[in-house]
Amino acid sequence: MLPHTLVRIVRGTVDMKTQNETTLTVFYNDDYINPSDIETRTKAKPIAELIEQGVVPGVRLASPTMATREQLLQVHSEAYVDQIWGESDVLRGSILASTGGVLAAVNQAINDGASGSLSSGLHHAKHNRYDGFCYVNGLALAALHAIEFFSLQDVGILDLDAHCGGGTFELVGNHPQVRLSDVSVVGYDTWSSSDPRHFIKIVKSADQYLDEVKNSLEHLCGIDFLIYNAGMDPFEDGGGMRGITREILEERERLVAQWCIDTQTPAFFVLAGGYTSSKLDLDGLAKLHIPTIKEFRRILSSK
């Protein structure tokens, strides 16, 4: 585990009686990490270290319990879950820890109003297969968990990863209590629907990006709960779209947080995409995700 210098990591759901009501809980432990894998399963560690160093005041890390086989079977086929169980101990542990963090973040956000998990690799996973670095569709699973355990009637999934969330649409696109809002800059894993509950836009130029983010949020007005896939891969220096700068992504995160504040919608975030390049090392990528955490901390401080 990380050195426990500035933030105490606890096991399972937080007992908020001992926490300041404006402390943002973000779920993470070192089981999330597969050191030999891509950024999807390595970048959470340097982000967690930044949190422990106090880069974002008022944030604490909490260690979730691993997701179970039975939970995965809510969205994936038995044959595919068997494949996951056949992966190496490290990879399987990373998948189950990260998925457990997503479910814990649902519970925490319902309790507090906002939370997060340093989870990635979610929205491309299909019912019976891995896709696009994603093994378990934690977004779909989170939506079903919120509906089943908290009796929510209208759950929104805001997907601002660079790529479309076709796996999420496959799994919950037909669910009458789930709304999808997807703004991408690449057509990979695209989907389409005539159902007015859903919104998808593939942006063609950077000057359209924030306007479409605003449209995606407007589409979600009236939901009971927000699941936010906060991808940083639209960033121009991380393989995204030319003209989508750090400043644009920071403004995007401000828009999402302010929408949650204005509509009083409980929400949690996951990291989603974000990759290194010749212009962006792992430390720089970790720092790119920090504005999401700062803005979700602001949601709590506004209460």
Image (spheres, helix red, strand yellow):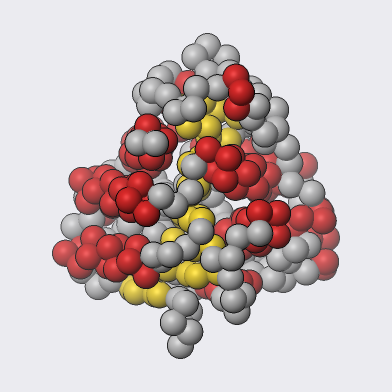
Q: Which residue is drawn at 40% across and 75% down?
A: 199
Q: Is residue 228 left or right of residue 255?
A: right
Q: Residue at x 48, y 41 (%)?
A: 114
Reply above or below: 303 against 76.
above
Q: Residue 287: which quarter of the image? A: top left
Residue 50 at what x, y percent from top left? 42, 25
Q: In this view, does 214 lie to the left or right of 137?
A: left
Residue 17 seen? yes
Q: Residue at x 23, y 55 (%)?
A: 244
Reply above or below: 35 against 141.
above
Reply above or below: 274 against 54.
below
Q: Is residue 302 left or right of residue 124?
A: left
Q: Residue 8: which quarter of the image? A: top right
Quadrant in the picture for the C terminus: top left
Residue 21 at what x, y percent from top left? 49, 27
Q: Residue 147: which quarter of the image? A: bottom right
Residue 53 at what x, y percent from top left? 43, 18
Residue 100 at what x, y percent from top left? 68, 44
- Pick out the residue farthest to the bottom: 194
Q: Which residue is drawn at 49% across and 42% down?
A: 113
- Pick out the residue farthest to the top: 5
Total marks placed = 0
Residue 36 seen? no
Q: Is residue 243 left or right of residue 222?
A: left
Quadrant in the picture for the N terminus: top right
